[in-house]
Image (cartoon, rainbow, N blue to C red):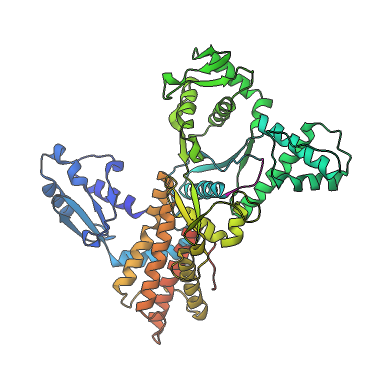
Amino acid sequence: MSIKMRLKHIIKTFLPVEIDEDKIVIDIPKDKRNGDYSSNIAFLLTSVLKKSPMEIANEIKDSIKDEIIDKIEVASPGFINFYLSNKFLLDNIKVILSEDKNYGKNNFGAGERVNIEYVSANPTGTLHIGHGRGAVYGDNLSRLMSFSGYDVTREYYINDAGNQMNNLGLSIKERYKEKCGKAYEIPENGYHGKELIPIADKLYKIYGDGKLDEDVEFFKKEGLDILLNNIKKDLDKFRVNFDVFTSEQSLYDRGLVDTVLTKLQRSGKCYIDEDALWLRTTDLYDEKDRVLIKSDGNYTYLLPDIAYHEDKLNRGYDRLIDVLGSDHHGYINRLKSSIDILGYDSSKIDIRILQMVRLLRGGEEVKLSKRTGKTITLNELIEEVGINASRYFFASKGLDTQMDFDLDLAVKNSNENPVYYIEYANARISSIIRKNKSQITEEFSTTFSERAYIIMKKLAEFEDIVISAASKGIPHLVANYLYELASLFHSYYASEKVVTDDEVYTRERITFLKAIKVVMNNASNMIGIILREEM
């Protein structure tokens, strides 16, 4: 049980009235003079108990007794401040080493079924840095929620239907004709970049000029398979994986799009205007109505998207989380309105919008790839700064903030680079452990410093950090926690000896360091980083 949950339970047990445990708020004060943890519960009880917050806080303080608490203080105008006992903090070291990779794991999600859809890049090219940010967020959130007891499905939606795919097929066919030495012409609405040339090369290597008479469907399918496979390889390299790949075309093939269209028409919320079919989404949350079928008879992208979300809801998920690009703000209300019109609960849909990424080199924005003259790809970023740095920098900022990615900083071998700083802490601990084969101790008899106890308190916070990051959808809490823990270790190591001639002292410090290493690596795993053992 996390510290916050345990303190909530303790407070509830000693309260003079019945109260929902979820209403008890526990905070970690920034100023440690206000305790290791603090609660404002006394303020919530004033109207019930007809007493001042100070009176209530002192009554609660006098009634609570628990082994994890060293002392309790009441601060005006009624805050209750808790200080953890040193014995509990030392005992927690043994818990960390015992639970090892499971330390911090919890059941906060209680099996809630959650579908997280992220990346879902159009399979018409390569992944760029914006996709990288969405990939890191979705993957980190999936890791954290799974670690916190949610039943998580990671999903990628393949946009493989519509005109863009026809244009892709036509473009690949023309590139194939070029490879075969025939006259070719890329369609005006086609893909004119050089990204499709390797696909034509591959088809020519397999078939020679034997596919010149094939129709566009062949080239569309071949191109989709190759491009999607390349996307999967890039994501796998980036330590991002999925449980489910859902094809947009499959929604049409299974009749789900037409079924949804019929339902919407029967809802009484559709109307014809200028030969187009509209959905009256303004009856709910939208600022304007939306077209479902254009005047030329083609479906808009909204219609299959509605069918896709109905399909996910029908699979039994309690919550759907969509991670979308910054140009999708207007998408939220139209989708939720449509889902409600179908008779579902749109509050189950949680759409997260990621903001733009600016790459900086020498303080100047980098917009284009030197290699292609186009947007910098995810692979190019990984090649330049590495997977750990790419993932950490993306993970360290909240999704709703525009971020600057400093390429110079990401490759610096100095403490200015947060990734280097974190990895150096882990490597330093690993080196000390390798050189000192001391067995871990079960008892602590020597005196630890205040710096050491500060680290122990930080280790004890880990489960609460995981729960907050998972339940609130803010994985950057873990990235920041990891940096803070590394910083505390570096400060501790710089000021105190870990290895001395005193065998007992040394064994206890090595045990302590092993606990720090466990938590550092567990936190790293939550954000997809594999820390180096040597530097």
Q: Using residue 140 as the reference point, say whether residue 175 is left or right of it.
A: right
Range drawn in magenta: 124-128
**Rendering quarter of residue 19:** top left
Residue at (39% x, 70% y) in the render: 489
Counting every numbered tag in the picture gives: 0
Direction from residue 431 to residue 126 in the image, left or right: right
In the image, is residue 484 above or below residue 266?
below
Q: Nearer the viewer, residue 35 or 117?
A: 117
The spot of residue 426 in percent (x, y) is 48, 69
Which residue is drawn at the image coordinates 65% and 55% (left, top)? 371
Left or right placement of residue 112 versus residue 121 in this view: left
Of residues 364 and 511, the one drawn nearer to the viewer in this rendering:
364
Query: Is residue 108 at least partly visible in the picture?
Result: no
Left or right, residue 163 beside residue 328: right
The x, y position of residue 132, in whole percent, is 55, 50
Residue 305 position within the rendered picture, expressed as x and y whole percent measured from the top left = 56, 29
- On the question of residue 180 being in view, the answer is yes
Q: Residue at x 10, y 42 (%)?
A: 51
Q: Residue furthest bottom?
A: 501
The C terminus: image quadrant: bottom right
Relative depth, front residue between 533 and 11: 533
Magenta region includes residue 331? no
The secondary structure that most of the magenta stretch takes on is loop
- In reply to whether residue 127 is colored magenta, the answer given is yes
- Choose between 170 and 133: the one closer to the eye: 170
Q: Provide residue 115's location: percent of width, then percent of height.
A: 53, 38
